[in-house]
Image (tube, helix red, strand yellow):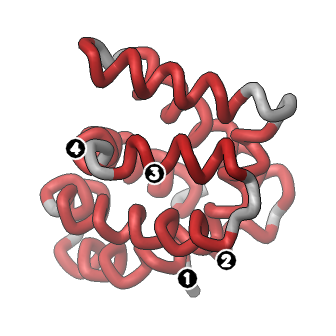
Amino acid sequence: MGLSDGLREPSKRASIVSDCVNLIDEQVANKGGISGIGMKAAYGAVKGIKPGYIEGAVARLLPEVLTALDPMWDEGVETGNPVGYLSQNSSRSADTLLSVTDTRIEKTDNGVVRGAYKKLRKSVKSDVEEAIPNLAKIIDKYTNS
């Protein structure tokens, strides 16, 4: 059974999407400095496309992200601590997540989203790495419920 199999239950899917959106919102809000200003502006532009756009994007990406993370999660299960394993391998986990978004962004016809992503992509890996421990906890919460 893969991680994305748990998304078949609509209430669970809605909850994990909500938790992931909250994680993204927190990560962006806590970003400081000049790069934080750019990230907040880009995130605001994407959020402004239409109400619920971020939630919809997360819902669309989540199955692919969980499928991509499945092998690493399984490696973590073998160690007895999948949350710790993803966290300890945050660079590899971030690369896995970003490979999904990189592939997806090439298929979008939304210029605002593509432009914002391309502006931030080179510098965003460290931000994704920072989010991995909390993402791993969210995944664990829904795989254990």
Which of disc 1 and disc 4 is earlier in sequence? 1
**Residue occupied by mark 4:** 126
Q: How busy is the neighbourhood of tag 4: few (under 14 within 10 Å), some, or many (20 plus)?
A: few
Q: How much space separates mark 3 and mark 2, taking CA atoms? A: 31 Å
What is the quadrant of the C terminus in the image?
bottom right
Mark found first going from the N terminus, 2 or 4: 2
Q: Is residue 3 above or below residue 23?
A: below
Q: What whole-number distance in Å separates the C-alpha atoms at marks 2 and 1?
A: 5 Å
The 10 Å Cα crowd at callout 2, few under 14, some 14 to 19, many 20 or more, is few
Q: Which is more toward the observer, 58 or 7?
A: 58
Q: Which is closer to the viewer, label 4 or label 3?
A: 3
Q: Are marks 3 and 1 in contact (CB under 8 Å)?
A: no
Going by the numbered disc 1, the residue's amino acid type is: Gly
Mark with earlier residue (4, 3): 3
Q: Residue at x 79, y 70 (%)?
A: 8
Q: Residue at x 64, y 63 (%)?
A: 61
Residue at the disc numbered 3: 118
In the depicted structure, whether residue 137 falls above or below residue 76: above
Q: Does residue 78 appear to the left or right of 69 in the view shown?
A: left
Location of mark 1 (residue): 2
Q: Amino acid at mark 3?
A: Lys
Q: Position of residue 35 (x, y in %)?
A: 29, 24
Near mark 3 (Cα within 10 A), the count class, few <14, some 14-19 or many ≥20, is few
Residue at mark 2 to residue at mark 4: CA–CA distance: 29 Å
Work out how far the residue at label 3 is from the one at label 1, CA to CA, in angstroms.
30 Å
Q: CA distance from mark 4 to mark 3?
A: 15 Å
Q: Of label 3 and label 2, which has the lower sequence position?
A: 2
Residue depth check, mark 2 versus mark 4: number of the one nearer the observer:
4
Q: Which of the numbered marks, if any, corresponds to residue 22?
A: none
Query: Which of the numbered marks, if any, corresponds to residue 5?
Result: 2
